[in-house]
Image: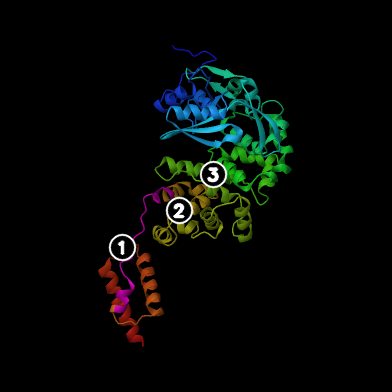
Amino acid sequence: MTTTAPDHIPPPEWMAAPATRTVLAALGAGGATVRFVGGCVRDAILGLRPDDIDLATPETPDVVIRRLQKANLKAVPTGIAHGTVTAVVPPATFQVTTLRRDVATDGRHAEVMFGTDWAEDAQRRDFTINALYADANGRLHDFTGGRADLAAGIVRFIGDAERRVAEDYLRVLRFFRFHARFAGGAPDAAALAACSAAKDRLDRLSGERVRDELLKILALPNAAVALALMQQSAVLPALLPEARFDPVRFTALTALQGDVSEQGGPQAEVWPRLALLLPAGDGPITERVAERLRLSNAQRLRLEGLLAPPPFDMAALEDDGIFAAALYRHGAERCRDHALLLGSANPQKRDLVIRRAVATAAWQRPVFPLRGADILAVGFSPGPTVSALLKELESWWAAGGFRADREACLAHLRSRVRTTAQGS
């Protein structure tokens, strides 16, 4: 049996990918040290594929840019003031950051000084599990005990928790997200206390930063764990005073979404989860939340639709014809969202809700066979009557399960005309 030394990890395939090797060769020209850092190393230890690949080096940003350009690689100064350059090797990108230490912080921004000390660079990071470094051969450099914390399922701030939080208050939300994703038990007491103590300073954060982090939390399979801790520590009310977290319903909704995805339906989305935190039917509240979180117009409309009166009740959900008509009128997305929200409060209807939600993935809106010209062709003059009659015929067609073809619809139209003529 092959074993791995405590200070090594088996290099995952992305470490040896051609794009990665190309960047490492360019940056390491002249013997410069380059190491993977942060989440990609953490994820490699856990056997996960990282979303981003971050690199660290003692070389200053101007040197990093010159070396990338000398190797004919694109270098983008994405965060040059903080020492970050993006190296582009299509289709991959790599964030390359110079080792640094914080000179001053104000809870939102940091003024940094570049350095050459790897341990000092580690000390300025947020959590021990995010302060791991590895070279191209998988040799680990762990200055804060991150690997042991990762194995123990502990999310712990580096050094003094309150100081780490005061450097950037977004770390409060990041703590809850990382705890829900990586922790295996009770939260670190010092971390939780520091987050709770900072609740009144979260208004210093921009709506965009809060939105992005909150949506990442809501997207987690274990989001209920994070929200419960946020509620317990008074962080959730500080961020969303309107929130009414119901752990039973939220957990039920999350489970429903997971089952729908597993059975071939759409992947779980955050919007029904956010809606479940807010009171339904209150337009001003929706507007306030949308403004505070800087939601886009599309996101705001999605949330408004979820908090509006549902297009059907549970009884209607059980009727094939009524549900098909609701799909036609409101679309697959809205019907699926509301079916899941109904299901979160009706666990006895779980199988029905899953079946309906899965079916929406393959649903295609049928096309009504008639047009206004067909109404005019049987003798009506242009005007409101044409539109009204067309809508009436469309409702008849939908109520019949969309089975009537064009000839059947025309026959019904002629019958409708005869009935109108006889009554006049």
Q: Residue 333 at x, y = what percent?
A: 45, 53
Nearer to the camera, 275 or 414 = 275
Q: Report the coloring of the rendering.
A: rainbow
SS class, disc 2:
helix
CA neighbours of label 1 inside 10 A, class few (<14), some (14 to 19), many (20+): few
* Quarter of the figure with the C terminus: bottom left
What amino acid is found at the position of numbered circle 3 in the picture?
Ala
**Where residue 283 sits: x, y (%)?**
60, 60
| Amino acid type, label 2 | Glu
N-term-proximal mark, 1 vs 2: 2
Looking at the picture, which amino acid does disc 1 mark? Arg
Q: Earlier in the sequence, mark 1 or mark 3?
A: 3
The dot on residue 403 is 1
- Is residue 48 in view? no
Most foreground residue, 387 or 423: 387
In terms of image quadrants, where is residue 61?
A: top right
Which residue, given by chain and number where applicable, does mark 2 sit on? 333
Camera-side residue: 185 or 287?
Answer: 287
Q: Position of residue 309 (x, y in %)?
A: 54, 60
Q: Report which residue position mark 3 lands on.
A: 252
Calculate the distance from the C-alpha at mark 1 to the C-alpha at mark 3: 36 Å
Tell me the magenta residue range: 357-376
Q: Is residue 366 magenta?
A: yes
